[in-house]
Image: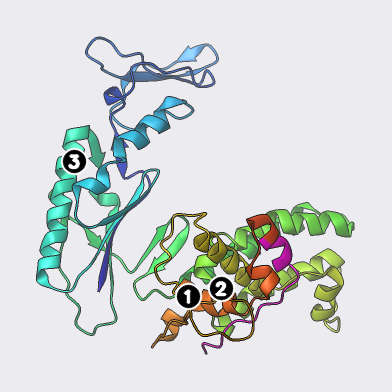
């Protein structure tokens, strides 16, 4: 079982008096404090000739300041060193996670939470327990479940949490994420339809590619689904967009031919290529993602000589995750593509390749 302690955005607050003695004005709307000898921070809001009374600023990072975010990151950068569990940080979002195989792991995780309390006191930071949650990820019928506390508050267990814009569910399925992406894509497409009523195909196509499609492809290399039902739900948004761009709403019109006319790749094909591009980054150490699961094969077959051993998977959920699904895609690449010497060259050569998803249904 894997347990995630998920601390939502803005759960970690800093006392600015600990690292900020001076700050520049923020667009004349927020006047940041200039600390006195005791380093007490205060601030006020101003609008034209009116200004509010000064009030103490006890937490947060001044928005718009140059040094504020840098110093904040400097302050929190040693957080992982204070615990034995794994920690991931991004701005003021943080996750602490640990594989729980016995009661001793539960005890150690609680001790890590206590260590974080000491860490926040040392550095003048402040966790907000009401914005911290835990997720138990397990396929066991009777997993080890334990209540965890932070600063005397019992943390609330949840089934779903959003981390960096991606929904993580306790069973690691992507149904919630796909449902959210489809809803967002439909809302954005509706917005475009209401506000861009021109008959110009180029303008409408540009609006779709600039506003709608990117909103459906954020982090797609991670959550790309393998179930046909979810794939079709995503494709329906693009099919509606094709009708809008070509202004063809008659039922007898073939949407497949519309997509061919527009020369649009399916969203599924684009997600597969995004996954392969991410894999290329990992292989060539362009991102800090461990490549320990990528084991070169010694068996020589047709194709390029940079193939990896396939990962065995007993469940469809695991088959659909990044590495088990990436490896067959990578192994199927033509030699000129796999041997590309730069990321730009790899993307250019990959654009002419049609990828087929491994069958996991």
Distance CA(mark 1)–CA(mark 3) = 42 Å
**Quarter holding the N terminus?**
bottom left
Task: Report the span colored magenta.
Answer: 346-361
User: Which numbered disc, 1 or 3, marks the residue that appears first in the sequence?
Assistant: 3
What kind of secondary structure does the magenta stretch mostly adopt? loop
What residue sits right under mark 2 in the picture?
A: 306
Number of the label disc, if any, that sits on residue 119: 3
Query: Which SS class for mark 3?
Result: helix
In the rendered view, tell whether residue 27 sits above or below residue 127.
Answer: above
Q: Position of residue 193 (x, y in %)?
A: 76, 59
> Left or right: 26 with respect to 126?
right
* Res 248 quadrant in image: bottom right
Q: Is residue 353 magenta?
A: yes
Residue sitting nearer the eye, 68 or 197: 68
**Foreground residue among 130 and 224:** 224
- State whether residue 296 is above or below residue 349: below
The mark closer to the camera, 1 or 3, is 1
Q: Secondary structure at mark 2?
A: loop
Q: Which mark is residue 38?
A: none
Q: Residues within 10 Å of mark 2 (few under 14, many from 20)?
A: some
Q: Observer-nearest residue: 343 or 203?
A: 343
Badge count: 3
Front-most of 76 and 169?
Answer: 76
**How far apart are the alpha carbons under marks 3 and 2?**
45 Å
Q: Which residue is mark 1?
A: 296
At a point 53% along the width and 74% down the height, the residue shown is: 326
């Amino acid at each position: 079982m894997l347990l995630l302690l998920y601390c939502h955005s803005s759960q970690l607050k800093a006392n600015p008096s600990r690292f900020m003695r001076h700050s520049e004005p923020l667009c004349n709307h927020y006047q940041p404090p200039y600390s006195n000898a005791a380093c007490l921070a205060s601030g006020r809001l101003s609008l034209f000739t009116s200004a509010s009374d000064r009030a103490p600023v006890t937490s947060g990072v001044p928005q718009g300041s140059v040094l504020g975010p840098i110093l904040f990151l400097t302050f929190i950068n040693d957080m992982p060193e204070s615990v034995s569990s794994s920690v991931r940080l991004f701005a003021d979002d943080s996750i602490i996670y640990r594989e729980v195989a016995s009661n001793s792991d539960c005890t150690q995780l609680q001790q890590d939470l206590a260590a974080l309390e000491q860490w926040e006191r040392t550095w003048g930071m402040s966790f907000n327990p009401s914005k911290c949650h835990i997720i138990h990820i397990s396929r066991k019928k009777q997993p080890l479940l334990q209540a965890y506390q932070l600063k005397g508050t019992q943390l609330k267990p949840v089934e779903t949490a959003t981390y960096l814009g991606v929904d993580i569910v306790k069973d690691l399925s992507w149904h919630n994420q796909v449902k959210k992406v489809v809803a967002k894509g439909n809302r954005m497409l509706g917005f475009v339809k209401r506000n861009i009523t021109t008959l110009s195909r180029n303008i409408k196509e540009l609006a779709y590619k600039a506003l709608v499609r990117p909103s459906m492809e954020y982090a797609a290399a991670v959550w790309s689904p393998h179930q046909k039902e979810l794939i079709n739900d995503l494709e329906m948004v693009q099919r509606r967009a094709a009708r809008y761009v070509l202004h063809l709403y008659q039922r007898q019109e073939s949407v497949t031919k519309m997509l061919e006319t527009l020369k649009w790749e399916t969203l599924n094909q684009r997600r597969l290529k995004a996954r392969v591009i991410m894999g290329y980054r990992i292989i060539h150490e362009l991102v800090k993602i461990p490549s320990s699961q990528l084991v070169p094969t010694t068996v020589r077959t047709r194709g390029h000589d940079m193939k990896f051993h396939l990962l065995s998977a007993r469940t469809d959920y695991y088959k659909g995750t990044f590495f088990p699904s990436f490896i067959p895609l990578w192994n199927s690449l033509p030699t000129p593509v796999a041997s590309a010497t730069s990321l730009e060259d790899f993307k250019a050569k990959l654009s002419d390749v049609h990828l087929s998803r491994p069958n996991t249904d």
